[in-house]
Amino acid sequence: MNARERFNATMHYLPRDRSPIMDFGFWSETLVTWERYGLPPGTDTDAFFGMDPQWIVAPINSHLYPAFEHVVLEDRGETEIVRDGDGVTKEQGKFLGSIPRHMDHVLKDRESWEKEFRWRLDGRQPERYPHDWASIQQRFQDPQRDYPIGINAGSLYGWLRNWMGLEAISMLVYDDPALFEEMVEVVTDCIIDSMSPALESGIQFDYALMWEDMCYRAGPLLSPAVFKRVLVPNFKRITDTLARFGVDVVITDCDGEITQLLPLWLESGVNCMFPLEVGAWGADPVEFRKKYGRDLLMMGGVGKRVLAGPKEQIRAEVERLAPLVEDGGYIPTPDHRVPPDVPLDNYIYYLDTAKEIWGKGLPNLLPTAPQGLELPKADPDRYSWHLGD
Amino acid sequence: MDLQPLYDSVLIGDAKTTRSIVEQALAEGVGPQQLLDDYMIPAMDEVGRRFEANEYFVPELLISARAMKGALEILRPLLADSGSQTIGRVIVGTVRGDLHDIGKNLVAAMLEGGGFEVVDLGVDVPPEKFIESIGETNADIIAMSALLTTTMPGMKTTIEALESAGIRNNVKVIIGGAPVTQRYADEIGADGFSDNASAAVRLCRDLVNA
């Protein structure tokens, strides 16, 4: 069984040899920290950690085109003020992975929408495909392709929130609901138009990937009522398009506490939640399966806090999730990018344990790290507060 | 004058109507403290209740806070002239190394709506800046925010700095943010923890009344 067959069997509850072994990636500081403990600088982490082929997504641009010019406006030492490709002026760490602080946005109202954004959302522009698309298409259409590929299905709220800022987009819902709805519809059109040539080309995509990041620790950033009225019909336009081309696994990067939106996402055809952040609110993929059954596909759900703690707890968590992994429809990964307080030694232990239990120790698993790498032990006191909540 | 519409306009986040009613009420001789205490703060309390009950979400909270803020711009000078005291002064800030400000801003907005005076130090605030601000403002409470597991130790560092400066007992410390828990608050010796902006107002009221 190859990685593509395994991914598809997992997402359709079909028999397979083992679970896919995948991850979500790392903060940049994590890799810098781990380099001090033996990770070769500039390493290909997928190869080093022995992951199955993962997150290969067709390089089609369904976002703003052209993007705004990226300009560094001010150097503040450890941080810098930039205006990014979304027209957002923000302060961001040059060396740290903290989420940047938005300071100003080109998109403010209908005038700026019409003048600066709407024309950048024409999904039919041929430049949305890379110049070497023909060769990529050929590789993707190869009947012997042994790895899963995805198509980018955009974002209906997350992009708008980034372009306007949370406060402005939140108030727009009330101050100018017609503009909010129009923006969502234009973005939806752009996503569908930009995906369509690839879908119509005959490439069989294994999944679609969306990004919203629209939940936080207390729930959704937008009310379920507005989500249902404005977003669900447009999500459905996208998922209906995908379904016509056989793409029935639609993953969304949702983040946060998702329970209030989950039924609406399922209603709209977005059926795979990722990364199922465990968070301080204690989300649990086992409980989600009990509540939503097999309609809900899941990825993620392995708490970062557990990875930072003692190894016996890491092993216990892998064992706890094993029946769900075996049931299918779920690919476990850390519940977000791995932060630098997870020791490299712990991460390697987690992967080795995952390969042993979820991967059943099969010979088609790739080794986690070169033999002979000496790693320092984690200091359990340092991470004690991670545990038990 | 029937002032129930003032309560209603804050509750639904109608800033224009809120401002208009406040101006009219003042012109008719209603005291600013009465407008605040009897209508606007109770309306924001109801906003908070609905927020915690998942009847209101971030947009609803923000538009109500905006209505409140607009009216406070009119009322504050009058309150100051009459010698009125706020129920407490809170310093808010995101700890050193963390640039995240959304949660902090929501807390600040709700605290203002709840009748507190807020001193917002912004993001990436080092312990010494919190200490300096206590000296300048004589604040009752410090409210610290962190988004990241890697920056939340800055809360502990700040509390330690308050102890070193000999002013820990002069001020209450509360914390919040995505990775923060009650257990962590207990571990680092914070006086309180809140997992949302509305509960933070309740917590601050409890602390200033303690």
Image: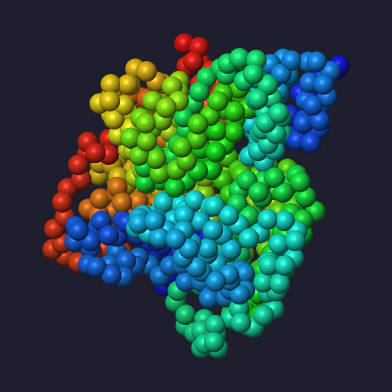
- Which x, y percent locates residue A43? 28, 69
Is residue A129 depicted above or below A100 in this figure? below
Q: Position of residue A18 (x, y in %)?
A: 39, 61
Q: Is residue A313 left or right of residue B30?
A: left
Image coords of residue B145 (percent x, y): 44, 36
Figure quadrant of the N terminus of chain A:
bottom left
The answer to whether any part of residue A202 appears in the image is no
Using residue A131 as the reference point, say whether residue A363 is left or right of it: left
Residue B54 versus residue A220 in the image, above or below:
above
Q: Looking at this view, is B76 or A131 the one in front?
A: B76
* Figure disc tally: 0
Seen at 50% across and 43% down, the residue is B101
Q: Residue at x 37, y 46 (%)?
A: B97
- Of all residues, the one furthest to the right in this rendering is B1
Nearer to us in this view, A59 or A272: A59
Query: Looking at the image, can residue B10 be seen?
Result: yes
Quarter containing the C terminus of chain A: top left
The residue sitting at the front extreme is B81
Name the image colouring. rainbow
Q: Is A164 or B118 nearer to us in this picture?
A: B118
Residue positioned 55% across, 25% down in the render: B117
Q: Please state the horizontal and vertical placement of residue B123, each as a whole percent of the image.
A: 44, 43
**Residue at point 57%, 19% (across, down):** B86
- The answer to whether A126 is drawn above or below residue B20 in the figure is below
Q: Quadrant of residue A248?
A: bottom right
